[in-house]
Image (cartoon, rainbow, N blue to C red):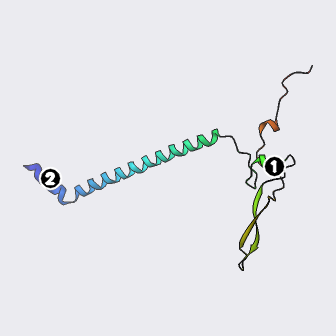
Amino acid sequence: MHWFWWVFIFFAVGGFAKVADAGRTALRTRHERKMERLESARQERKELADADRTPEPVCGCTHHLAKHDKQGKCHELVQTPVAWDADQKPVRYEAGPCTCQQYIGPQPLSQIYAEDLTDRE
């Protein structure tokens, strides 16, 4: 029966609250770390998928390389404003040519480097 007084004193000084608080803190920390690991794994999968994809040949005007001619001029139609309101905000648009002058995106490898297949000697 001597141990009963020790248990009573432990509860009286708030020992149980400290133990419960330590348990809650440990569970919260465990949960936060698990969420960080899951986010890290998701980010890694996204980076691997992005690294495996070849770069899209897209110009600064957001049009694909296929829309540009050999000189680099864009032949895509875009919406250009033709009327403005009192606050200088466009209110009416019409289709017009893209004003992009030259494609500046990544060049396909076939246009950059092609090693000779045979030796001419």
Side of 46 where 37 appears, left or right: left
- For disc 2, the marked residue is 6
- Identify the residue at image location x=7%, y=49%: 1
Compared to residue 35, the image places residue 98 above or below, namely below
Disc 2 or disc 1, which is closer to the eye? 1
**Mark 2 residue element:** helix
Residue 94 image point, x, y percent: 76, 65
Q: Residue furthest left?
A: 1
Side of 24 where 98 appears, left or right: right
- For disc 1, the marked residue is 68
- Identify the residue at image location x=16%, y=57%: 9
Q: Are marks 2 and 1 in contact (CB under 8 Å)?
A: no
Instruction: Tell me the kind of residue under disc 1.
Output: His
Residue 59 image point, x, y percent: 76, 51
- Identify the residue at image location x=75%, y=56%: 61
Q: Quadrant of the C terminus?
A: top right
